Image (cartoon, grey):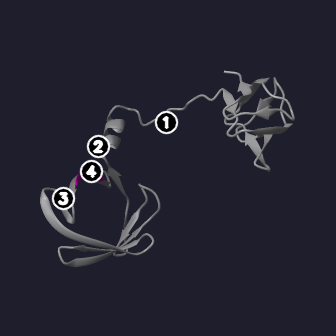
Amino acid sequence: MIREFLVNIDGQRIPVVQSGDKLCVLDQQISTSIVELRPNIYSLIVDGHSHLIHAGEGPNAPLTINGQTIHSEIITERSELILRYGQQKKIQEVVNELLAPMPGLIMQIMVQAGEEVIQGQGLIVLEAMKMENELQAPRSGKIKHVHVQEKEAVVLNAILIEFES
């Protein structure tokens, strides 16, 4: 399988093509071998020379190669298109309803219509499979309508609470 991507190091975009254990960097073919020694620590052999790499967590985490830290970013064709067309902002879905994540019994309702809530605030306690589950507000906003009552049985995806738009 052939993979093509760009590596952004200090603002310089370097095209890389990977095919098996061969890399083509700046139109130069390089033989490589990489072995994970411990989690996030690798031994990389490039053209017969060994390099110790410590990789941070996440796609844009700094790399430490032979004791020297570099900040890099791997840019795939997909991420390049997203950046090029200005779609890097998250698309946020406005959640206007709290749905039952499983069938169960409403044990407690902690809010009422007209009340302002904040994201993460407990709204309803739903008992399912002999366990009580506190359902929290998926967003901040005002409660428009509570569709259930305590001790009412609900099915999966039943509308429990509706938020004002």
Secondary structure at badge 2 equals helix
Magenta stretch bounds: 1-7
- Residue at 33% from the left image edge and 53% from the top image edge: 74
Mark 4 neighbour density, 10 Å: few (under 14) some (14–19) many (20 or more): some
Between the C-alphas of marks 4 and 1, the distance is: 22 Å
Between the C-alphas of marks 4 and 2, the distance is: 8 Å
Secondary structure mostly seen in magenta is: strand
Q: Is residue 7 above or below residue 139?
A: below
Q: Is residue 123 visible?
A: no
Secondary structure at badge 4 equals strand
Q: Is residue 123 above or below residue 97?
A: below
Mark 3 neighbour density, 10 Å: few (under 14) some (14–19) many (20 or more): some
> Residue 78: percent from the left, percent from the top?
32, 41
User: In the rendered view, does 46 fall on the left or right side of 85?
Assistant: left
The residue that mark 2 highlights is: 77
Point out the tag, 2 or 3, that comes first from the N-terminus: 3
Q: Nearer the viewer, residue 5 or 127?
A: 127
> Residue 51: percent from the left, percent from the top?
29, 76
Question: Which of the 4 quarters of the picture holds residue 10?
Answer: bottom left
Q: Nearer the viewer, residue 160 or 55?
A: 160
Q: Using the image, tell me which numbered label, if any, was put on residue 90.
A: 1
- Is residue 153 magenta-colored? no
